[in-house]
Structures are given as structure tokens and as C-alpha cells.
Image: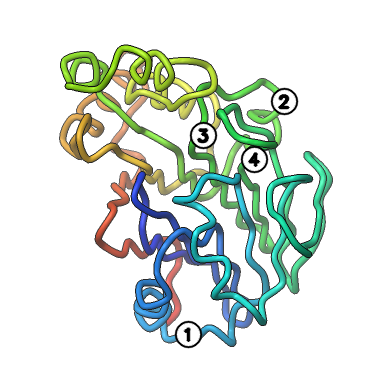
Amino acid sequence: MYFNIVASGSKGNATLIANKNDLLLIDMGVSLTCLKHGLENINKTLDDIDGCLITHDHSDHISGVRYLKNTKTYALKNTLSGNYNVIEPYVSFYIKSFKITPVLTSHDAINPCGFVIEDGDEKLVYITDTGYISDKTIEYAFNPTYLIIESNHDLSMLMNSNRSAELKRRIRSDVGHLSNEDSAFYCLDIISKNTNQIVLAHLSQECNTPFLAKTAYERVFDYAHKDINKYEIKIARQDENLIGGRYEN
């Protein structure tokens, strides 16, 4: 299994998950040109996409769904308008060779979720846009090969930003976004012996930096007496593709 995070952040999100024969898209909140560029980077086309999984109804995750006219779309109830495949939390289903389990997240959206995607002995967990992660979701997500997890903001940068007090409260709340430190602690609850790659995703461009996110992880792992060097830590960005997993060109 391999993945290409085409874009990750408040301006738009899209992630491609693939193996030798099959291809999934998580969220479509980018332009068609942007998605096509991401597909080209892994030698794929729009016609190769077997299904699109939607995490929630915010525009940075669904604004480009209209471009996927020939692609089956999957989301929890009331997430999208029009016709789509309604899926249930913690109920697994298959798209081609991929086993997919939606897991609940906590965000100010209608029925937000993340996804656990399994392919043979590999497991990818995708959790972003959440203010906390429940014990049940951690149970389903536990011991992934690849973990893509939100690390949205540095708390000091957020509190010292020009954002309104109301927005700051919303971001820090249980239906907001994970700080770097909260993300790292949840990561420690999720990872185990099979984990080899951790991707920090949905970083705020105004209230975070890759350096601060990585430093927070190092500090939390050190506090927990966990060797961070055992894992490959990657940073997803808004305007750069990030290819991970076992990429097959």
C-alpha cells in the first residue's frame, strides 16, 4: 500500500491511497487540476479511482466532489447532498481489495469520521479534523502500519494570533482541531509494533510550522520514554504532494 497526500490544510484536502491494482481518494476539496497533478505523480488518472471517501461536509474537503461524476462516493449519513453511498460508523465494507472501516471523529460538522483502510497485512489510519479521539476509535485504529493524524496548531501561536476569541475557543474545543501536543499523545495511544510511518497532517499555515509540530512530537515522545527515531515522521503540506507507504512506480 502507498499514498499520496495531494493537499492537507484548511485551503483544501485530498489524499490518494493505492496498491498495485486499486485506488481510493479520501476527500476532494481541491481543484481538478490539483487532483490530476497528484494522480500524475503516482502514474494514475481519474479513471483509475475506484471510490472516494468523504470525512465530513466542510468545503475544504468536499468542494471538488462535483468533478467526480464517474466515481462512487462514500460518506456517513447527511454528509453530502444528492446520491452517494451511505456508510455506517465502525461497520466495515470493501472497495475492490481495500477493507475500509469508518471511525468517528469529533468536529463541528455533520457526522465527521476518519478511516481505517486495510490491504493484506498493511493498515493505514487517516484521522484529521477532530478535537479529540475516542477510546473506541483508538481501538479500531490501533497498531497501524501508516498513521496520518492531524497536528493542526501550536497553542502559543494560536493564542497570540489575530484570530477572534470565539475562533480560538472553537479550535481548542472538543469539536475543533488537535494541537501538536494533543496529537502526539493520541499518536502514542495508537501506534504499536507494526507502525513505521507517521504523517502529521492538516497543519495550520498561520498557527503552526513543520518545525514546531515535529519538535512537539519529539518532546512528548521523550516524556513518554518512546524512541521517536524508530518511526519515519513526515509532514503533509498544503501545496506539496507527499508520497508515503511502499510506493510502487
Which quarter shows the C terminus? bottom left
The image quadrant that residue 138 belongs to is top right
> Amino acid under label 4?
Cys
In primary-sequence order, the first of circles 2 and 4 is 4
Residue 136 disc label:
2
Does dot 3 land on a helix, a strand or a loop? loop
- Mark 3, residue position: 191
**Does residue 20 sit above or below 165 in this rendering?**
below
- Mark 4, residue position: 113
CA gap between label 2 and label 4 equals 12 Å
> Amino acid under label 2?
Lys
Q: Nearer the viewer, mark 3 or mark 4?
A: 4
Q: Position of residue 129 (x, y in %)?
A: 49, 36
The image quadrant that residue 149 belongs to is top left
**Colour option used:** rainbow
Q: Position of residue 232 (x, y in %)?
A: 33, 47
Does dot 2 land on a helix, a strand or a loop? helix
Q: Nearer the viewer, mark 3 or mark 2?
A: 2
The residue nearer to you, when weighing 235 against 70, is: 70
Residue 118 disc label:
none
- Mark 1, residue position: 44
> Amino acid under label 3?
Ile
Does dot 4 land on a helix, a strand or a loop? strand
In primary-sequence order, the first of circles 3 and 1 is 1
